[in-house]
Amino acid sequence: MSPSEIEALARGFFDAIEAGDVDAVAACYAEDAVIWHNTDDAETSKAENVATLANFIRYIPERRYENRRLTAFPGGFVQQHRLTGKRRDGRAVEMTACIVCAVSGGRITRLDEYFDAAQVAAWSR
């Protein structure tokens, strides 16, 4: 894939999360994709991540990726952003993040999430 094709995949992935389109998110992943989180050093599967995202979308019905800084390169991309949202109770939340993805065959094969643990904890308070 060219960097412009990888950029399109990345934009589509984050746009789908923002729109709450779990099926479109799932379509961006390879079947054997691995998702890793720095906050718990755990690797999860595509199915586990899609289920987590579905719960996240229910819990944070309004969400937006702001200040997206996307860099695509052969075999993947990096995106830094600020994720803002409103919880179901109306409380505003935000966190900064860095997402590093490996891409092959037009799909994300590995996604490494880097969040500040304190910011993640504030989302669930």
Image: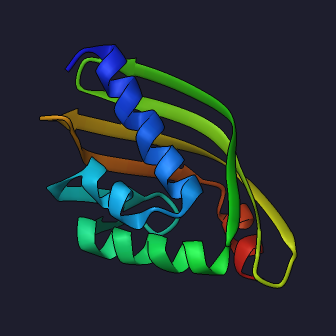
Q: Quadrant of the N terminus?
A: top left
Q: Is residue 77 visible?
A: yes
Q: In this view, does 39 lie to the left or right of 76?
A: right
Q: Is residue 66 left or right of residue 68?
A: right
Which colouring convention does the figure follow? Answer: rainbow
Give x and y (percent) for residue 120: 67, 67
Q: Which residue is drawn at 25% across and 65% down?
A: 46
Q: In this view, does 16 lie to the left or right of 102?
A: right
Q: In this view, does 73 lie above or below 47?
A: above
Q: In this view, does 20 lie above or below 75?
A: below
Q: Is residue 26 left or right of residue 87?
A: left
Give x and y (percent) for residue 55: 51, 80
Count up the numbered dots.
0
Residue 107: quarter of image: top left
Q: Residue at x 39, y 49 (%)?
A: 112
Q: In this view, does 50 lie above or below 82?
A: below
Give x and y (percent) for residue 82: 71, 44
